[in-house]
Amino acid sequence: MAKDETYDIIVIGGGVTGAGVARDCALRGLRVLLLEQGDYNHGASGRNHGLMHSGARYAVTDPESARECVEENAILRRIASHCIEPTDGLFVTLSEDDLSYQQTFVKACHASGIKTEVLSPSLALLLEPSLNPQVQGAVRVPDASIDPFSLTLANIVDARLHGAVTLTHHTVTDLLVNNGRVEGVRAINCRTGESQEYHAPVTINAAGIWGASIVRHAGIDIQMFPAKGTMLIYSKRVNQMVLNRCRKPSNADILVPDGAVSVMGTTSDHIALDTIDALRVTDAEVRLLISEGERMVPSLSSTRLLRAFAGVRPLIASDNDPEGRSISRGIVCLDHASRDGMEGLITITGGKLITYRKMAELATDLACSKLGVEVGCTTATTPLPGSENGKSARTNYIASRKNTAANRHGSRSRQIPAEDTSDRTFVCECEHVSVGEVKYAIDQLHAIDLVDLLRRTRMGMGMCQGKNCSCRIANLMARLTGDTAQAQQDLNTLLDERWKGLKPIAWGQILRDTQLTVAIYQGLCGLDKAIAGRKEGQP
Ligand SMILES: Cc1cc2nc3c(=O)[nH]c(=O)nc-3n(C[C@H](O)[C@H](O)[C@H](O)COP(=O)(O)OP(=O)(O)OC[C@H]3O[C@@H](n4cnc5c(N)ncnc54)[C@H](O)[C@@H]3O)c2cc1C
């Protein structure tokens, strides 16, 4: 066992909430350690629509959550501009919807302070030509598109710039409980198998839907409500504005433009807590999303799908609502000292991607009060690294019509090596990822393996889904790290990861493409034989 280490705060979880907490703590001068079992964004933070809610979606059914969104939407536009495309959004009424709901919706938005503009069907079609021509009405709201990967990473980068230690691929396996107080955690390094204790007077549980299993180590029970949501990615950006159906939040009623693609979602199903690590997208979910999507935007019927994926909302159970749609998306901050008589432990959960900063502020305020620290929160006014020049990702997207390093890293993209031709060479053409960006992701963004690289740079996330670039990037990784065997193993993991998202939609052209990928990597490169050989101890 390695030497024990001591901090002021330990944060469990490297989703957007944990990253936000680590940043807030570090900006207040605290010595902070963040432990994440996978890579950053391994959980819900890497598995959502990327919709920067104006709050309108919750105005009628969940006004508390709507107000949290309104405030944070305005703050994120200032501090995280490089992660945001300010597209605006339309809440559209189709012929099968009840047009009178529009009035209820607009009234509720006004009550929560959300700006609305009621549009005629013809004006809505002018603004968003992809809409169903039979649209009955539309309301414009300040929704936007936000890149969750860039957002979390920018928080991690700033936390580290302010002294935080963040360790990915480290799973917390136990809480160190002594005399009714949590004094730290035990964690295992998933790559080396080494176990180590880390000590701190306060531990913040930001483990999302896994949060219930964390507090159980201290004998505490939290009733989580795992609500699975499935989404589809279309290979081309069909809509320019975020589209929502103007009705109570329901299945398959959101279409979000995200750089060069569109994301259709979502379903909502209560699942058993012991299935959250083995999510499976079902045929029924895919069919529902396709048919509802085509009602809103008919051209989706001739647009190729890119992949399907699912995430689990970290909600706290409050009643027997079978879909979890009536459970508040509001923030839940639990002080386990007052709730359960267990000092030194805080849980921060619920909320949304876009309310992460407020969640972090609440948890850090509580931690500071326990530590007797009186430094205030500055995250609402301090731009994230990459957003210092206040330029939105839209400016970059519109200028280039493609995803670029500048979209992903904002002003920090200037640090990407680009002096010689080899650094400027693309290794992933679909997403315009250069050799220099891969080097930057390894050196500055702590990417350890190929799947980490995918989350840092979007390589392999484009049209070819890794078919053309995986091999090249594995080769580059092997050259940069000097570990060919690991790069080969990671290539296998990456291709498996890509396959998970293709399998639920594998028919027609996608199936043909997948077969080509198999032929290249198994037939031509002999990847399966190489891995099997190594498992049997061959070189
Ligand atoms: C289908 C769907 C669509 C959504 N769409 C939107 C949207 O458009 N806009 C929006 O604002 N919000 C959206 N959300 C909500 C949003 O994604 C979540 O509220 C948010 O990402 C939660 O972040 P988190 O950091 O709290 O949790 P997570 O991102 O789940 O992070 C928890 C982290 O803890 C880690 N962890 C767990 N156990 C351990 C352990 N033992 N040791 C170390 N680490 C551990 C996990 O690996 C994980 O990375 C959506 C959610 C879903 C599921």
Image (cartoon, helix red, strand yellow):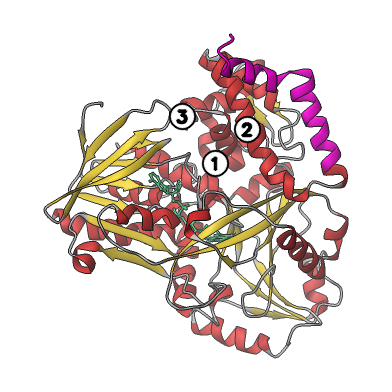
Disc with the residue nearer the chain's start (3 vs 1) = 1
Which secondary structure, mark 1? helix
The quadrant in which the N terminus is found is top left
Q: Is residue 519 magenta?
A: yes
In three-dimensional space, the C-alpha distance between marks 3 and 2, rounded to whole angstroms, equals: 21 Å
Disc 2 designates what residue?
Answer: 494
Query: Vertical placement of 84 versus 467: above or below?
Result: below
Residue 374 in the image: state x and y as whole percent.
Answer: 17, 56
Query: Would you call the spot at circle 3 few (<14 residues within 10 Å), some (14-19), or many (20 or more)?
Result: few
Residue at 52% x, 77% y is: 321
Which secondary structure, mark 3? loop
Asked whether, in this view, residue 508 is left or right of residue 240, the answer is: right
Which secondary structure, mark 2? helix
Disc 3 designates what residue?
Answer: 444
Q: Which dot marks residue 410?
A: 1
- Magenta stretch, residue numbers: 511-539
Residue 317 in the image: state x and y as whole percent.
Answer: 43, 71
- In this view, the mark in front (3 or 1): 3
Q: Mark 1 belongs to which amino acid?
A: Gly
Residue at 61% x, 42% y is: 407
Q: For residue 376, which quarter of the picture?
A: bottom left
Q: Mark 3 belongs to which amino acid?
A: Gln
- In this view, the mark in front (3 or 2): 2
**Residue 155 shows in this picture:** yes
CB of mark 3 near ligand 1 (< 8 Å): no
Asked whether, in this view, residue 501 is left or right of residue 291, the answer is: left
Disc with the residue nearer the chain's start (2 vs 1) = 1
CB of mark 2 near ligand 1 (< 8 Å): no
Residue at 66% x, 17% y is: 530
Q: Residue furthest top?
A: 539
